[in-house]
Amino acid sequence: MHAEHGHVVYSGAASYPAPLVIERFSAPASAGITVMIASGRNALHATWHSMLTGESDIEITGEPVLDAACLATCVEHHLPNVLLIDKGLLDGLDPQSLRRIHEQRQHVRVLLLWDEVCHGLVVDVLRNRFHGFLPTTCPPETCLKAIRAVSRGELWLSRASMAMAITDLLGLDPEDAGASVEELHADASEALTPRELQVVARLRRGCINKEIAQELGIREDTVKKHLQSVFAKLGVHRRALVALRRLPGYGANHSIA
């Protein structure tokens, strides 16, 4: 089994959503999916509200939850099918409130939200018995797919977050993780081009080729050619390993639009 962008796929299978049911779940009686948003950021609430209000099968339930202190009570009162919780608000939850949310996991699926894939995220998801992680930078269509998949009982983790989890589990230095996976080719010191860095930045967010092409305004075949060049320079054959590499010309905090 390996992780595709937002999907869980199995070796030899096509990269399409495949259910990974992690426990029995009480599905909603109606076709609609109720969603609760919990974040201390008003801008994030506004973005998600705008994204979800036009969907006929998704309904926002309850008022926006801005304070960690009242989250457990709101969840118990509304019992949303899917709870979207910002990592910033999660970090402010006390153990008792977290236990109260756990007690509703037969009815409530939880998607963790954060701005970037960082170390410890998958550990947070698994330790808290959540049902996936979704970067806030994902395109709207990916966010909607994630909500619908999680509401059906699937686990939603991106390829990039799984790659990051590997470095956590292996105890690798995030700067040099790639060198521990396999030796770099002799030409790995060759700097990636600016366009290749843009492609890699989006691959590390878990974007698939089609989404990378749309964001950069290029053809999908062109994305494939850039990735082939990146793989050759880094000496890898899998997309997930790119997230483990210390990239030439790409520092730990490097960001390319």
Image (cartoon, grey):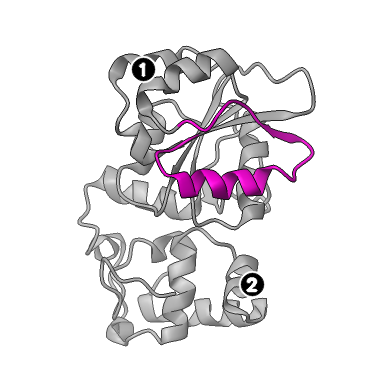
The x, y position of residue 93, in whole percent, is: 32, 26
Asked which quadrant contains residue 29, the reply is top right
The x, y position of residue 243, in whole percent, is: 38, 62
Asked which quadrant contains residue 66, the reply is top left
- Within 10 angstroms of label 1, few (less than 14), some, or many (20 or more) residues? some
Task: Inspect this view and state whether residue 15 appears.
Answer: no
**Residue in the image at 66% along x and 76% along y:** 220
Residue, disc 1: 97
Relative to 216, 128 lies left or right: left
Task: Inspect this view and state whether residue 54 appears.
Answer: yes
* Residue range of the region highlighted in magenta in the rendering: 38-65
Q: Give the secondary structure at mark 2.
A: helix
> Any mark on residue 43, and which?
none
Asked which quadrant contains residue 211, the reply is bottom right
> What amino acid is at disc 2?
Gln
* Residue 163 vertical placement versus 244 (above, below): above
* Residue 95 vertical placement versus 178 (above, below): above
**Depth order, front residue of 118/169:** 118
Query: The C terminus appears in which quarter of the rendering?
Result: bottom left
Q: Give the secondary structure at mark 1.
A: helix
**Depth order, front residue of 238/214:** 214
**Residue in the image at 65% along x and 80% along y:** 221
